[in-house]
């Protein structure tokens, strides 16, 4: 497997509680790791969702294609561009905004104070 190195304070605390190595890993080390891991991983997910071609997997390409087809069906009237693309923007915003807010909340909740 792999080996985990404990700091002296963690090792002493686990020894004083008579924890085995497995108990120390599950009850001391991993909770600290998750606390430090959650905010950056959510931040990375939010960045990927909002700023990369991953958004095409979320249906943005289909929305744009359907908007273009609807505008063409109405004889290419330019006054329809803003409502159709505004609706596409609204749908994308409705998906991304909660992710961004959840990221901010998790970063605040699990902030590591050094």
Image (cartoon, rainbow, N blue to C red):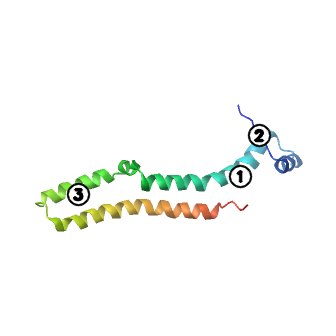
SS type, badge 3: helix
* Separation of residues labelled 1 and 3 (CA atoms): 47 Å
Q: Quadrant of residue 24?
A: top right
Q: Which residue matches tag 1?
A: 32
Q: Earlier in the sequence, mark 1 or mark 2?
A: 2
Q: On the rendered structure, is 72 left or right of 67?
A: left
Q: Quadrant where the N terminus lies?
A: top right
Residue at 53% of width from left, 61% of height from top?
102
> Relative to 28, does residue 98 appear above or below in the rendering?
below
Could you tell which of marks 3 and 2 lies nearer the N-terminus?
Answer: 2
User: Where does the image place residue 86, in percent across and percent down from the top left?
Assistant: 29, 65
User: Which is in the foreground here, disc 3 or disc 2?
Assistant: 3
Q: Residues within 10 Å of mark 1 (few under 14, many from 20)?
A: some
Marker disc for residue 67: 3
Residue 23 in the figure: left or right of residue 88: right
Q: Which mark is residue 22?
A: 2
Q: How many marks?
A: 3
């Amino acid at each position: 497997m792999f080996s985990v190195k404990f700091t002296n304070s963690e090792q002493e605390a686990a020894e004083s509680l008579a924890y085995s190595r497995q108990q120390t890993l599950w009850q001391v080390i991993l909770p600290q790791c998750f606390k430090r891991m959650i905010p950056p991983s959510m931040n990375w997910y939010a960045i990927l969702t909002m700023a990369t071609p991953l958004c095409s997997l979320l249906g943005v390409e289909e929305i744009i294609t359907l908007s273009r087809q609807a505008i063409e069906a109405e004889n290419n009237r330019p006054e329809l561009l803003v409502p159709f693309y505004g609706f596409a923007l609204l749908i994308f915003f409705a998906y991304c905004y909660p992710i961004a807010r959840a990221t901010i909340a998790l970063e605040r909740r699990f902030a590591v104070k050094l």
